[in-house]
Image (cartoon, coloured by chain):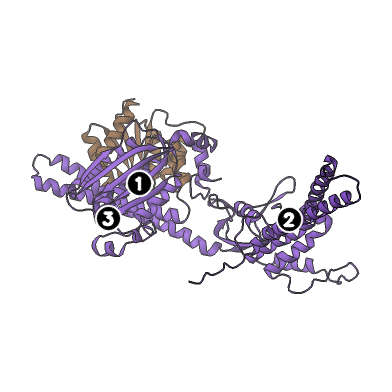
């Protein structure tokens, strides 16, 4: 599935702008939400090809957002890929629960925008 | 030169005594046989050349000897058992299993009390003769129910186990499960294979009296309500009616503070990683975008910035892992993987680190090595730590060789440097937390958790980490990881599915569940 539209849910301005700058340069259409509530609403209102999801978010955590979108009986975003991007070292249970529902789980400090683009391209092919 | 006679050991007494007695018995039987043979000749029953004379004499000797030895063995058995018991309470090393007073034959013939008396003497329980209580002399107040109700008012748990590890007594504070058949079991989650049961099994084999303390043992999962943390003190007394007594001291309040510390470290790491993300990210972006205008030396400055930011990020991972490892929260999730592809994930970073510090890093990991059971991220961190060390403790221009080969049931990775090396006295402490050799403390920066957590991670893989070194010539660290095929069955049996991992994830395991017995 070719990825074209991306929703970034990220509360850190520097990090958000950094990713969006690189993603836009690479030709993706990117929407950016700063808090968890707005992020969840955006994800449900528009069908994105990819969601970049932070964990530590104001209003609503990334864990809850993913649970709301994919945790129930029905997958609310069947045509969307999800990459969890976090710097927070979650406890194992939450981490594994998120990994189960996401297509990738990355530590932000361990990757650069260049590597993120490579991951997105990889997902684009699968 | 005076020859000192070795002090006699109790354990030597029985074999020597038995040998001596055996010789005496045989000589006596020989005498009897000769005497009977002589009498038969004197009384003219047989003449000396007749075969029957010799047959009768040999038969008398043979039968007599067999009967005597059998009698000796039967009559000597209790003495032998008593001696075995004495050897055990004397503390002499022995491979004898101490006699168990609860064996049927001992209970039957009354020898049980004799053995128990000896064992109790050793633990100081029997300082004066015990007067048996008969029903006539029983006091009006039932002491045992008084004691039971008193124990129910303490916050410490008290549990008594019999010789079959079944619970025969537990006060209210003790964490106990009762299943539908009314069978009680202890609700304690020991770490790894170091459980009460394995300890008790060892006691049954080797000890008469033993004590053991476990700290920070939880009664339920970290996510469950009303979780308590105990220090568990176990006393084992072979043959006693309550063979094992457990005292559980509730330390929940103290240990929960530690748990909050863990949260603090996780939050602190989160805050530190934010700026690092931006620094690493923009360095990468800028170096690309400026590549046309940057001078060579400016490129080098960028590389140094990148290496520094990467090291900082690796160091945060070490802190997080150490904090989890120390609190037994570190989990590795083993999956089939190849060493070469794991190295690929850190290869660029490592080359950059080596080249920016003028070391020649050569890596030869054959792609066709057997696959291993590994946690990709953790193992990558270990290799990164070891290469970092090799860089730190070698000189500019020094070669660092990373090689790998299959060895038995393991794939062995070697990281060799030709740096300053270290004396043997240093090596034994090398993997201890915060250990820094005296010299490296003066010359090389570091905190001493890299090797400590590396060892923790490798052992959680069921692997081994080791070092060979020669002062002035360099060091070689080796890491052995189990080949996947050798553990695949165990991994699958351990239900290594995602659900299985979630279950283990909250289960306070220090090591991968596969390595728990």
Q: Residue at x 42, y 28 (%)?
A: A78
Q: Using the rendered view, name the quadrant where residue A98 is placed.
A: top left
User: Which element type, helix, strand or loop, lies under badge 3?
Assistant: loop
Q: Which residue is labeled 3 in the image?
A: B421
Q: Residue at x 33, y 39 (%)?
A: B404
Q: Residue at x 47, y 61 (%)?
A: B258
Per the rendering, the colour in which chain B appears is purple
Q: Which residue is labeled 1 in the image?
A: B478
Q: Nearer the viewer, residue B400 or B84?
A: B84
Q: Earlier in the sequence, mark 3 or mark 2?
A: 2
Assess whether mark 1 and mark 3 are in contact (beta carbons under 8 angstroms).
no
Q: Are marks 1 and 2 on the same chain?
A: yes
Q: Which mark is residue B114?
A: none
Q: Earlier in the sequence, mark 1 or mark 2?
A: 2
Q: Using the rendered view, name the quadrant where residue B72 is placed.
A: bottom right
* Placement of B327 over or under B120, stated as above or below: above
**Relative side of B284 to A100, left or right:** left
Q: Are marks 3 and 1 on the same chain?
A: yes
Q: Which chain is brown?
A: A
Query: Which residue ends up furthest to the bottom in the rendered image?
Result: B128
Circle 3 Cα neighbour tier, 10 Å, few/some/many (<14 / 14–19 / ≥20): some
**Relative side of B428 to B445, left or right:** right
Chain under callout 2: B
Q: Nearer the viewer, residue B150 or A87?
A: B150
Q: Earlier in the sequence, mark 3 or mark 1?
A: 3
Q: Which residue is labeled 2 in the image?
A: B22
Assess whether mark 2 and mark 1 are in contact (beta carbons under 8 angstroms).
no
Q: Position of residue B392 (x, y in %)?
A: 25, 54
**Relative side of B254 to A3, left or right:** right
Q: Marks 1/2: CA distance? A: 57 Å
* Placement of A72 over or under B89, stated as above or below: above
Q: Quadrant of the C terminus of chain B?
A: top right
């Amino acid at each position: 599935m070719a990825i074209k539209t991306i929703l970034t849910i990220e509360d850190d301005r520097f990090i958000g702008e950094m990713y969006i700058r690189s993603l836009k340069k690479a030709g993706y259409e990117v929407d950016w939400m700063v808090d968890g509530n707005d992020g969840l609403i955006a994800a449900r209102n528009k069908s994105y090809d990819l969601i970049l999801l932070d964990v530590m978010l104001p209003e609503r955590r990334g864990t809850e957002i993913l649970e709301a979108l994919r945790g129930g009986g029905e997958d609310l975003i069947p045509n969307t890929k999800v990459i969890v991007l976090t710097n927070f070292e979650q406890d194992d249970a939450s981490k594994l629960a998120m990994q189960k529902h996401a297509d990738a789980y990355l530590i932000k400090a361990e990757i650069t925008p260049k590597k993120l683009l490579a991951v997105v391209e990889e997902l684009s092919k699968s | 030169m005076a020859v000192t006679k070795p002090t006699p050991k109790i354990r030597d007494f029985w074999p020597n005594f038995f040998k001596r007695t055996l010789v005496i018995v045989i000589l006596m039987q020989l005498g009897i046989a000769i005497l009977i043979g002589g009498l038969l000749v004197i009384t003219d029953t047989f003449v000396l050349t007749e075969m029957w004379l010799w047959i009768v004499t040999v038969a008398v000797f043979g039968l007599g000897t067999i009967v005597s030895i059998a009698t000796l063995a039967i009559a000597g058995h209790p003495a032998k058992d008593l001696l075995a018991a004495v050897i055990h309470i004397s503390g002499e090393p022995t491979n004898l299993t101490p006699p168990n007073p609860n064996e049927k034959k001992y209970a039957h013939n009354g020898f049980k009390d004799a053995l128990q008396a000896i064992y109790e003497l050793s633990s100081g329980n029997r300082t004066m003769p015990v007067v048996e209580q008969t029903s006539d002399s029983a006091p009006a107040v039932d002491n045992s129910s008084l004691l039971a109700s008193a124990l129910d008012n303490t916050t410490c748990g008290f549990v008594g186990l019999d010789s079959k590890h079944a619970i025969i007594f537990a006060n209210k504070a003790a964490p106990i499960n009762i299943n539908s058949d009314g069978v009680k079991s202890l609700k304690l989650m020991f770490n790894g294979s170091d459980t009460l049961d394995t300890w008790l099994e060892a006691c049954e084999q080797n000890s008469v009296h033993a004590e053991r303390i476990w700290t920070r043992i939880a009664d339920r999962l970290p996510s469950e309500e009303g979780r308590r943390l105990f220090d568990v003190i176990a006393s084992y007394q072979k043959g006693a009616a309550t063979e094992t007594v457990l005292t559980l001291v509730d330390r929940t309040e103290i240990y929960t503070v530690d748990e909050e510390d863990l949260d603090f470290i996780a939050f602190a790491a989160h805050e530190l990683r934010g700026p690092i993300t931006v620094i690493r990210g923009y360095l990468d972006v800028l170096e690309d975008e400026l590549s046309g205008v940057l001078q060579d030396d400016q490129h080098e400055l960028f590389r140094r910035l990148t290496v520094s930011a990467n090291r900082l990020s690796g160091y945060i991972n070490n802190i997080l892992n150490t904090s989890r490892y120390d609190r037994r929260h570190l989990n590795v999730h083993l999956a089939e993987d190849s060493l070469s592809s794991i190295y690929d994930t850190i290869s660029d970073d490592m080359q950059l680190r080596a080249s920016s510090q003028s070391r020649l890093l050569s890596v030869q990991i054959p792609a066709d090595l057997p696959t291993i059971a590994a946690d990709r991220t953790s193992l990558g961190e270990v290799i990164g730590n070891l290469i970092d060390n090799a860089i730190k403790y070698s000189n500019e221009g020094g070669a660092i060789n990373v090689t790998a080969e299959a060895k038995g049931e393991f794939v062995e990775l070697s990281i060799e440097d030709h740096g300053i090396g270290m004396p043997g006295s240093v090596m034994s402490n090398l993997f201890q937390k915060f250990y820094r050799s005296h010299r490296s403390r003066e010359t090389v920066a570091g905190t001493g958790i890299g090797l400590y957590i590396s060892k923790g991670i490798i052992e959680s893989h069921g692997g081994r980490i080791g070092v060979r070194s020669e002062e002035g010539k360099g060091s070689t660290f080796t890491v052995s990881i189990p080949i996947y095929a050798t553990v695949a069955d165990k991994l699958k049996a351990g239900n290594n599915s995602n659900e299985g991992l979630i279950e283990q994830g909250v289960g306070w395991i220090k090591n991968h569940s596969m390595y728990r017995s």
